[in-house]
């Protein structure tokens, strides 16, 4: 391997994590980020690791898949999770962040690292040789996407999905919307909840069913990601699908009636000042005027002003089982790695995890070592296995889920106990692996902070 400096393309969650992991192992990195000179359709700032939609990294509880993955990231020493914890907002058991404070912290840590050079420039082609990590995310620039197509031999990298609206907090009717977290989790009152009775819900459903959605383009005919379906798509699946999905009322009591509402729209705090609130699970591709009309039918939101409306967006990813090995190296070229959403994982935490794996792997390659393969019992290992060995037919990026882990030898009967045992086994397996000679720890150790799990 001639070049000893690793090139990381894309300063998002995956690229920042990858650059950090490499540099903290003593390997110099050039991190290329094309913003602000070349913007994307969704990013608003020039900061690294800008969150483009939800401000939540989801649960921190290890009984939840996202929580387990985060616990593992913290044990290995993740820059992104460390910065997210520093910028944390109240959100029940979830790790929600002030997006500006979060991105600012990541940018400061990356630009302050002596071994990382940040280049503000679009990379238009895959660098021809030398250790390279491509982490350009779902909005990868067109020119690089073409170059990737040339490498992977796929004709099409793109499909589309949808994002939720954000509301100005001053325009939410607090006489109606009540503060509570489901089952009193977190501080017990982290969310604002807009309650719907049966007739409110029926009226809303009927209006949504015949609402005007954005025009279908060719790309729309491809699959929307199942885990992020627009509400109008969910509604098409049945009158009660929303009530059992993003509008489920379980674990909530309306203080005005003393009863559980028929349905609920939850609003999650989106910035530290609590002036912005995002509609949880309300990603959609309805026309803007339709969104305003429809969402103002929801009790508590009659006067709502929208800071941002829902929309559809481009989403690039490779068919990873055809292209990648477990190490996120490509099958055809040892020194070319993919990370983040582009590599065929889905979500903030998973993108961070793949960046971590690719970053540690690239550093290992420069030093003549083998890139890490985490134990199959761990969330990290299971993501590695998924991207390399899932069925390539109709491949879709994945979130980490307990179902990706091998079953227990003697599984307890209750789901909760099974999850507890599976999570404990994962943490044990990771601990053993981290102590093994196969794993090179960070020269800069974040783990004392991470130990406060
Ligand atoms: C609109 C939208 C909403 C989303 N909502 C959510 C959500 O709510 N929750 C969730 O978990 N996930 C969401 N996702 C998925 C989300 O993008 C990923 O989870 C996460 O941001 C992926 O991290 P990443 O590092 O792979 O990509 P990104 O965070 O997008 O980072 C990629 C970076 O690469 C840069 N770049 C692109 N091309 C080039 C180039 N040629 N040269 C140099 N730099 C380049 C971009 O400017 C960007 O900064 C959403 C995606 C989109 C597009």
Image (cartoon, rainbow, N blue to C red):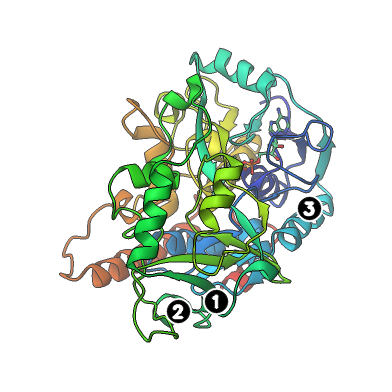
Give the left or right position of residue 413, taking residue 114 as reference: left
The tag on residue 271 is none
Residues 173 and 390: in front is 173
Q: Is residue 227 visible?
A: no
Answer with the quadrant where ligand 1 appears in the image. top right
Question: Which badge, 1 or 3, comes first in the chain's sequence?
Answer: 3
Nearest to the observer: residue 91 or residue 251: 251
Q: Which residue is mark 1?
A: 190
Closer-to-camera residue (342/115): 342
Q: Nearer the viewer, mark 2 or mark 1?
A: 1
Q: Position of residue 85 (x, y in %)?
A: 64, 68
Choose mark 3 or mark 2, whichever is in front. 2
The residue carrying pointer 1 sits among few (fewer than 14), some (14 to 19) or many (20 or more) residues within 10 Å by Cα, namely many
Q: Are marks 2 and 1 in contact (CB under 8 Å)?
A: yes
Q: Are marks 3 and 2 in contact (CB under 8 Å)?
A: no
Return the residue at label 3: 107
- State the residue at coordinates (78%, 48%): 47
Q: Which mark is residue 185?
A: 2
Relative vertical location of residue 225 with respect to residue 190 in this rendering, above or below:
above
Q: Quadrant of residue 121?
A: top right
Q: Position of residue 417 (x, y in %)?
A: 25, 72
Residue 108, by quadrant, is bottom right
Looking at the rendered image, the quarter that the N terminus falls into is top right
Residue 36 vs residue 297, the one in the foreground: 297
Nearer-N-terminus badge (3/2): 3
Check the image and report above or below for 321 versus 124: below
């Amino acid at each position: 391997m001639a070049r000893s400096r690793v090139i990381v393309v894309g300063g998002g969650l995956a690229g920042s994590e990858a650059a950090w992991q490499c540099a903290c192992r003593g390997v110099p990195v050039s991190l290329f980020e094309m913003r602000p000179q070349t913007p994307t359709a969704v990013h608003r700032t020039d900061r690294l690791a800008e969150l483009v939609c939800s401000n939540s990294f989801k649960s921190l509880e290890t009984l939840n898949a996202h929580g387990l993955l985060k616990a593992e990231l913290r044990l290995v020493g993740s820059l992104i999770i460390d910065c997210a914890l520093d910028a944390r907002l109240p959100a029940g058991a979830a790790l929600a962040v002030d997006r500006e404070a979060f991105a600012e912290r990541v940018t400061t840590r990356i630009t302050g690292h002596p071994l990382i050079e940040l280049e503000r420039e679009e990379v238009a082609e895959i660098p021809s040789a030398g250790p390279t990590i491509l982490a350009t995310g779902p909005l990868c620039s067109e020119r690089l996407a073409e170059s990737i197509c040339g490498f992977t031999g796929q004709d099409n990298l793109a499909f589309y999905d949808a994002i939720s609206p954000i509301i100005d907090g001053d325009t939410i009717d607090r006489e109606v919307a009540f503060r509570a977290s489901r089952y009193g989790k977190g501080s017990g009152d982290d969310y604002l909840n807009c309650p719907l009775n049966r007739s409110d819900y029926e009226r809303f459903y009927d209006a949504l069913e015949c609402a005007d959605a954005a025009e279908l383009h060719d790309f729309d005919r491809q699959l929307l990601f199942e885990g992020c379906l627009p509400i109008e798509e969910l509604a098409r699946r049945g009158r009660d699908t929303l009530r059992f999905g993003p509008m489920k009322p379980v674990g909530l009591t309306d203080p005005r009636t003393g009863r559980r509402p028929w349905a609920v729209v939850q609003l999650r705090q989106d910035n530290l000042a609590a002036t912005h609130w995002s509609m949880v699970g309300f990603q959609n591709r309805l026309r803007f005027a339709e969104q305003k009309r429809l969402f103002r039918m929801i009790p508590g939101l009659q006067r709502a002003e929208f800071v941002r409306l829902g929309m559809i967006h481009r989403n690039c990813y490779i068919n990873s089982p055809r292209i990648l090995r477990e190490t996120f190296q490509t099958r055809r070229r040892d020194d070319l790695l993919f990370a983040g959403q582009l590599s065929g994982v889905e979500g903030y935490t998973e993108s961070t995890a793949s960046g971590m794996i690719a970053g540690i792997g690239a550093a290992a390659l420069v030093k003549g070592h083998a890139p890490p393969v985490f134990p199959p019992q761990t969330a990290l290992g299971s993501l590695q296995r998924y991207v390399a060995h899932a069925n390539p037919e109709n491949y879709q990026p994945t979130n980490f889920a307990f179902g990706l882990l091998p079953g227990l030898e003697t599984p307890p009967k209750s789901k909760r106990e099974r999850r507890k045992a599976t999570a404990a086994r994962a943490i044990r397996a990771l601990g053993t692996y981290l102590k093994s000679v196969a794993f090179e720890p960070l020269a800069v150790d974040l783990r004392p902070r991470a130990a406060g799990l």
